[in-house]
Amino acid sequence: MGILSFVTVFAVLILFHEIGHFTTAKLFKVKVLEFGMGIPPRIWGITRGGTKYSINALPVGGFVKMLGEEDPSDPRSLGAKPAWQRIVVLGAGAFMNALLAIVLFAIVFMIPQDTRVGDLTVVAVAPGSPAAEAGIARGDVIRKVNGRTIENFGDLSFQYQLRRGATATTIVERNGEAVPIDVIPRWKVPAGEGPTGITIDLFNDRFVSRSEPIWGAIPKAGKRIGDTVVLMKNGISAWFVGNNSPLDEISGPVGIAQVTGEVAGLGVIPLLTFAAVLSLNLAIMNVLPIPALDGGRLFFIAIEVIRRGKRIPPHKEALAHATGFALLMIMFVAVTYNDILRWVRGDSFLGG
C-alpha cells in the first residue's frame, strides 16, 4: 500500500510539473525532444509530432528534454528564445506544483470533516519555560494565538510552530476575563516539553462537522500555503539554532514512500494534505538557485539579464549543471542510505 500510494502521489505531482514545462515550451515553439515520466532506463516510448513520450523504469521523477537548453544556435532551441520566455518555461513547473497545492488544500477544506473541539486548558507549566516567564498559569483556557481561534491541540501546536523564536500573542481566559500574554516559543526544546513548556488538556470536548464552500476554501488554501512556507523556513532554521538534526528531517524516495504509506493509512484527507505539502516542497525546491534544477537555470538567466544580454558561455553553464547534478546524486545516495537505516530500525518517519 505504501509503495502504491507513493508511486501514485509522486506520479501526479511530477506529471503536473512537467506539463507546465511542456505546455509553455510548445506555446513558445520550442522543440521538445522528449516528455518522460520516471528516470531511465526507458521501458516504453512512442513518438508523436517530433516528440518522444516515454515511461521509464524508476518512478521517482520526470523530465521534459528541450532542444538547446543552454545552446542558442538553433532557432527552435530554448536557448534561442528571449529571456522572459525562458523564465516562463523554466518557472512553469514550480508554478504548476504551487497551483496543485492550492487545489489540494481547497479540496481538503471543502470535504466535510468531524473535528474535535473544546476548551484547551493549561494543566501544568514547566518552571523556567517561555510560558512560565510570560505569565501563563495553570487553569488558563487558551482562546486565541496570533489572532487565530484555538479549539484543539492541533490549532495550538500549529500556531506556536509558526512563531518559533518570535512573539506569539496568546489570549487566555482567566477567571472569566480575556488576558493577552506575549510568549516566545523557543527553538531549543528540552526533552518532554514543547516549544512553550505547557501541558494542556481538552475539556468540554465535542465533535462538530465543518466544511468550506469553494469561495471560502480557495482563500483559506492560499493562507495555508503561506503558513506552510513559514513552517518549512522554521524547520530549516531549527537545524542551526535549535536541536533538530537535518538527518532526522530530510527524507529521500524511501523515506517519502514510507511516510506516504503511513499517511495513507490515516485516510483520504491526511493523504491529500500530505500531497499538497509535498507538491509545495517540489515547487520551492525547484526554484532554488541550485545548478541542474530549474532554479539553477533561472539563476543563469538572471545573470544574463543583469549583464544586459551577455550570456555565460554554453559550455560553462552546461559544466555547472553537470556538477550540480553529480552533487545532487551524491546527496540522493546519502539520504537514501539514511532512510534505509531508519526503515531497518523500524522508526516511524512521522515521528513518535
Image (cartoon, grey):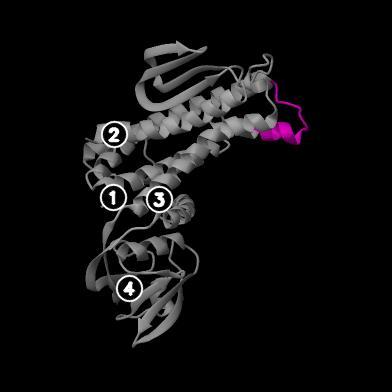
**In this figure, which residue is indicated by the disc labeled 4?**
126
| Residue density around tag 3, few if under 14, some if 14–19, many if 20 or more, within 10 Å | many
Amino acid on which disc 1 is placed: Gly
**In this figure, which residue is indicated by the disc labeled 1?**
351
| Residue density around tag 2, few if under 14, some if 14–19, many if 20 or more, within 10 Å | some
Taking the spot 49% from the left edge, 17% from the top edge, the residue there is: 34
Amino acid on which disc 4 is placed: Ala
Residue 255 within the segment the image draws in magenta: no
Residues rendered magenta in the picture: 300-313
Place of residue 119 in the rendered image (x, y in percent of width and height, measured from the top left): 29, 74
**In this figure, which residue is indicated by the disc labeled 2?**
340
Depth order, front residue of 318/226: 226
Which of the two marks, 2 or 1, is nearer to us in this view?
1
**In this figure, which residue is indicated by the disc labeled 3?**
106
Report if the CB atoms under discs 2 and 1 are less than 8 Å apart: no
Which of the two marks, 1 or 4, is nearer to us in this view?
1
Chain-order first, disc 4 or disc 2: 4
Element at badge 4?
loop
Query: What is the quadrant of residue 318 in the picture?
Result: top right
Element at badge 3?
helix
Chain-order first, disc 1 or disc 3: 3
Separation (CA) of disc 4 from disc 3: 38 Å
